[in-house]
Image: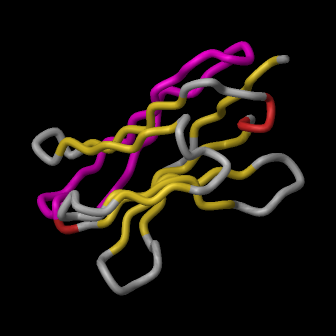
Amino acid sequence: VQLQASGGGLVQTGGSLRLSCAASGRTFSTYTMGWFRQAPGKEREFVASFSRSGAIRNYADSVKGRFTISRDNAKKTVYLQMNSLTPEDTAVYYCAAKVAGTDYNYWGQGTQVTVSS
């Protein structure tokens, strides 16, 4: 599967953005989809994931209550709605896919999110 992330940009503190990740291939619905981010000088960290069944969504503690992950299998797209953004959310955001029971091994190219204070 190939992934293409989009929707990043510059936003003020307290603002919102919605990231999208479009996937190619015919088996999108079989993948667990995730969002990760990497801030300058920091390691990449998990943000959110959405199981292939749609039954399980997981979030990093730092984004709980502010970010929402969703997916549209018909459109082969996963979204990350980000609200109440803070400068600490500034990072390159990556979408990723994995088959259940494995590590994430499909990655998009990343989209920059910058939150100004």
> Is 113 situated above or below 94?
above
| Residue drawn at x 16%, y 60% as measured from the top left | 29
Tell me if 65 is positioned left or right of 92 in this view. left
Tell me if 54 is positioned left or right of 103 in this view. left
Tell me if 56 is positioned left or right of 63 in this view. left
> Is 20 situated above or below 100?
above
Quadrant in the picture for the C terminus:
top right
Magenta residues, as a range?
Answer: 1-29
Residue 54: in magenta span? no
| Residue drawn at x 12%, y 59% as measured from the top left | 26
**Residue farthest bottom in this picture:** 101
| Residue drawn at x 15%, y 48% as measured from the top left | 73
| Residue drawn at x 66%, y 31% as measured from the top left | 113
Residue 60: x, y in percent? Answer: 59, 56
Residue 83: x, y in percent? Answer: 55, 26
> Is 36 situated above or below 18?
below
Q: Quadrant of residue 80?
A: top left
Tell me if 84 is positioned left or right of 3 in this view. right
Q: In which quarter of the image is residue 92?
A: top right
Q: Quadrant of residue 45?
A: bottom right
Residue 2: x, y in percent? Answer: 34, 56
Residue 104: x, y in percent? Answer: 46, 72
Quadrant in the picture for the N terminus:
bottom left
